[in-house]
Amino acid sequence: MLKTSTAVALRQHEIPFFAPSIGEAEIEAVVETLRSGWLTTGPKVRQFEEAFGRRVGARHALATSSATAALHLALEAAGVGPGDEVLVPTLTFASTGEVVVHRGAKPVLVDCNPQTLNMDPDDARRKVTRRTKAVMPVHYGGQPCDMDPVLDLARRHGLKVIEDAAHALPARYGDQHIGTIGDVTCFSFYANKTITTGEGGMLTTNDDQIAERVRIMRLHGISKDAWKRFSAEGSWYYEIHGAGYKYNMTDMQAALGIHQLARCDEFWAARQRIAERYDAGLADLAEVVTPWTELNVQHAWHLYVIQLQLDRLRIDRNRFIELLNQAGIGVSVHYLPLHMHPYYRDTFGYRPQDSPNARDAYYRIISLPIYPKLADEQVDFVVETLARIVAENRKVNSIAVCRTGGDGDGRRKPVPNGLDRNDPGLAAAPAAGEVGCARGAEVAEPAASPRMPGLPVRATKRTFDIMMSAAGLLVLSPLFAAVAVLIKLTSRGPVFFLQERVGRGMRPFRIIKFRTMIQGAHKMGRLVTAGKDPRITPLGYFLRRMKIDELPQLINVLKGDMSFVGPRPEVAKFVELYREDFAQLLVVRPGITDLASLKYRHEADILGRSADPERTYVERVLPEKIALSKQYVARASLWLDLKLILATLLRLVY
Ligand SMILES: *Cc1c(COP(=O)(O)O)cnc(C)c1O
């Protein structure tokens, strides 16, 4: 069978997302430490700290059990506590946010720069309040955050700068090593970071007071200095100077770390070479935007994050990842932004649109494998696979290469979806020889694919729509007449209810339904209807339950505003909130039913249980519906349409 032979062929290319580089020297060092009798914090930790401090040029380097622990200690030493606010980039790992919460403070989530994906200093500035105590830039993927404006902001408002450098060894901002810039910097030696001790972290600072506090608090708040001063007591004597933590590193970890640190530059060179190979290999693939690197930095290349040009592809990011996985390539996503996680949403009330750049980036990003053990042939295989997936899933209208080109410095300017709004330079007219770059709604035709051949299928679908809607209207005309009479008899106002919705190519049209509410109801109150709504007439309840109120949409189908199957048309207000997503969806006509409509057919009941139905709809239901509709658009075929129509009719019966 074809399937098995493909699977065998793929197995040869299995490329994990990450594999550590642990040499014999490291293994021997750990064994030697076990023999030495120093299992916990001892001479190896001190040696590792000294070597690390020298490496980055910081006065103090304090080893911890993890970067998370280091960040927590840094906030404690900086005096962050209840009632305070801390600026945290939303595009980060769990640690950066949670430690703020552990201090009883509020993480104020900051949007990212759409190109570097690092924290946007302008957005940080907008979010400063009287309560802001600290700012925690993350050097995303290993590329230093733009620190000058961050330091400026901190100076102006008296904020502590605590850097999450979990990705950023070795990295430089200008001629400064990361580890010497802010008040405190925290590194991670977690298994998949640029050097590892299995678990472990390091805090660096040039501030003696902070160093002293961290030294005490990382081990139960215990100080032995008192013993030095009052030598009358024995070596058993200690004093507790704070409710500290158990955040120390062991000598076994440090033994590993000493050797890993010595190989730091060797590892970095390998990562840099891989990044360059990806850059070169992907340069001509307009659908894949390679990482933007600033000129004045050394990038640690912990991550190599591409951004898909979704408006040029018929598949979404998740499907893209599935296809990479099927080819044996492990990839990841860094990150679902903190503000979109249930905890932050529910606790602090963040909404997806609060950090739109991070939200939009989330749907486009994929982290490719990058680690010293990755061979050139493996990098090439990843590049070839990306090119193949793009070739098989490209929209017909966007074959053209549309880059604004390099600026002669070897960097390519990425043009991610919709990023050109604020940058006229990126929206430049196409150069001679390049075909113009249609984007968003202008790529308004569904594309050809193996499953959904272009024009013939679209023509068939339209013919089907016309014939079936005409037939339906004819057959149902007695019912229409009866309903019309009933509506007129039971309440004042017109038979039909017309409402503007956003249709194909983002063009508005008016959807037609039987009126189920009292006249003028849509002008009062919310846009979504939930559970028992006082605006709905008794007859309206019946019509809604039987879905009869939706039947006049057959007229929309006949007119060509809609199709039987397609994403539900939404009102402009909601489309605005997820504009990029709808621009992708509305390459097809909106429909009466699709995967999303089927799943959410009891939507009104779900919303009826919510305290704020409109918010629940916008934040929970709509993103799910969009995701499902994207699946439909990516996989659309006549066969799927027929199945969905049948499923919809069956669901109507019970
Ligand atoms: C890995 C990581 C951390 C946490 O590091 P640990 O050493 O595992 O605690 C913190 N922040 C970021 C951005 C990370 O990627």
Image: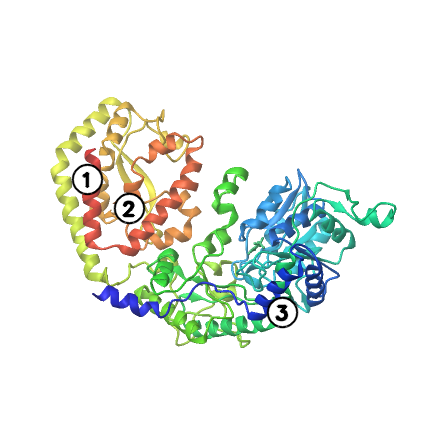
Q: Which residue is mark 3?
A: 296
> Between marks 3 and 2, how big is the CA–CA gap?
48 Å
Q: Is residue 570 left or right of residue 638?
A: right
Of callouts 3 and 2, the N-terminal one: 3
Quadrant position of the N terminus in the picture: bottom left
Q: Tell me the number on the disc at residue 595.
A: 2
Name the spot of residue 43 as percent of width and height, x first: 71, 60
- SS at mark 1? helix
Q: Which residue is mark 1?
A: 649
Of callouts 3 and 1, the N-terminal one: 3
Quadrant location, ligand no. 1: bottom right
**Neighbour class for label 3 at 10 Å: few (<14), some, many (≥20)?**
few
Amino acid of disc 2 = Leu
Q: Please give the name of the residue rendered at 43% of the width and 54% of the height, measured from the top-left corner.
A: 363
Amino acid of disc 3 = Asn
Comparing 624 with 429, the one in front is 624
